[in-house]
Image (spheres, rainbow, N blue to C red):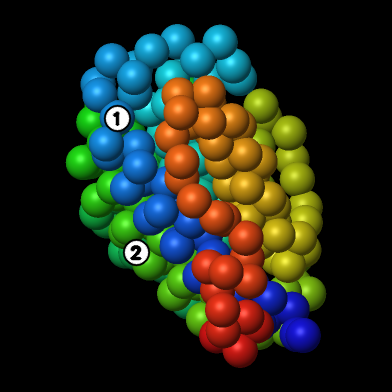
Amino acid sequence: MSLINHFKMMAKYNERVNEQLLTHCQELSDEQLLANTHSFFPTIMDYWNHILFGDLIILGRLANNNIANLASNDFDRLPTAKSVHDVFCENMNDIILLRKQVDALINQYCDHLTNEVCQSVISYQSTEGENITIKVGDITQHLFNHQTHHRGQLTCILSQLGVDYGCMDLPVLVREGSTV
């Protein structure tokens, strides 16, 4: 499997698993969405906002470096990520709408990646002020790892609430595999 097909497959997985989890979160009460989770982030809503933060800040860094046809105007209708504790949305309906926009942008980004672009290097400053230089392929992999890491925490919380969110296996959600 090529790296490009891998990233396209991961973008589809990301989109589909987000939709699946958000559908179940939409069924939760406001009290459940805002209850203290006693975990890494205080509430389920905080998890969704943080996952969006990670996606937006990474995509913004890629756009600032003119990578894979990402442009600043792609972000005209999207919030600007500044802090790991950004709150972009205060309710699940707004999270769902923003999540769909960001997932579409991730798919668009992956559709324009090439092997040469993945080997190229970008530089940016982290939210902590550290200067980072990294290959585009590596930061793209981090985009997906960050989502998966925090969705794993989120599914633990949903399990504790008795939510059956279904199968999240890659071969089930992206049956077409790396041929996407």
Q: Position of residue 97 (x, y in %)?
A: 25, 51
Looking at the image, which residue is at 74% across and 40% down? 131
Which image quadrant: the C terminus?
bottom right
Quadrant position of residue 108: bottom left
Q: Establish if 172 lies above or below 97.
A: below
Residue drawn 52% across and 60% down? 14
- Asked if one can make out residue 180 in the rendered structure from this viewpoint, the answer is yes
Residue occupying image coordinates x 46% and y 28%: 162
Q: Is residue 95 left or right of residue 141?
A: left
> In this picture, is 134 found above or below 173?
above
Percent across and percent down for residue 83 are 50, 28
Q: Is residue 112 visible?
A: no
Please count the marks in the image: 2
Disc 2 marks which residue?
74
Q: Secondary structure at mark 2?
A: helix
Q: Position of residue 57 (x, y in %)?
A: 51, 45
Q: Is residue 55 left or right of residue 100?
A: right
In the foreground, 58 or 38:
38
Q: Quadrant of residue 5?
A: bottom right
Q: At 56% from the left edge and 60% from the top edge, which residue is drawn?
A: 62
Give, as a three-letter code, the residue at label 2.
Answer: Asp
* Amino acid type indicated by mark 1: Leu
Residue 28: mark: 1
Q: Residue furthest bottom?
A: 179
Where does the image place residue 111, in percent across and percent down from the top left?
Answer: 51, 81
